[in-house]
Amino acid sequence: MDHTVYLALGSNLGNRLSNLKNAISNLPPQMDLKKKSPVYETPPWGYVDQPSFLNQVVMVETYMESENLLTHLKRLETALGREPGFQNGPRVIDIDILFYDDAVIDSPPLVIPHPRLHHRGFVLVPLNDIAPHLVHPVLGKPISELLLDVDRLNINEYKGK
């Protein structure tokens, strides 16, 4: 396991909590789970006419190179029930690479760090739980500082129902 990777997980269709748990349980053997944030219930972002999301961030270690990891995660999403949709639309599971070591990658199909993570409270709140001192390699600011500039309204720790 050579690379430290932060992944954002989200779900707003079906049994959302079970979808997140299934995604995490299917990370091995390619990824070794090191940390996971609490689960948060968050309003939809972008396209708002859809159910609320459950979001979580995990830190993993992997031997996979970044593009192979992306391909693997897309296959995993499909295996877990994700169907083609539209950008920011409803989905059973979404797994995004936020950070891959301290790499800066900008070549299709992959942009790392995730290009919109610093605008998204639903990513920064759980990421701050497990990595507040992690420095964004492009912006040069720690997650705890990036969190100060986003709307955290209606982002609440999920207590289950």
Image (cartoon, rainbow, N blue to C red):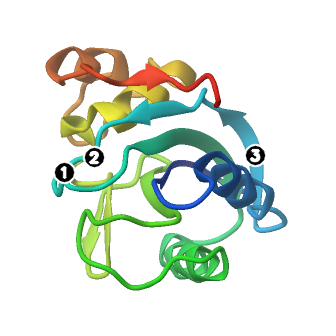
Task: Give the quarter of the image for residue 152.
Answer: top left
- Residue 1 visible in image: no
Alpha-carbon distance for marks 2 and 1?
5 Å
* Residue at the image position 28 percent from the left and 66 percent from the top: 89
Q: Is residue 61 left or right of residue 88?
A: right
Residue lying at 26% horizontally and 15% vertically, measured from the top left: 145
Characterize the local packing of mark 3: few (<14), some (14-19) or many (20 or more) Cα atoms within 10 angstroms. some
Three-letter code, disc 1: Val
Determine which of the numbered discs, if any, sits on residue 48 in the image: 1
Spot occupied by residue 112 in the image (x, y as percentages of width and height): 33, 58
- Residue at image coords 66%, 34%: 36
Residue 143 shown left or right of residue 14 in the figure: left
Amino acid type, callout 3: Leu
Which amino acid type corresponds to the residue marked 2 in the rendered image? Pro
Quadrant placement of the C terminus: top right
- Which mark identifies residue 33? 3
In the picture of the structure, the residue carrying the numbered disc 2 is 44
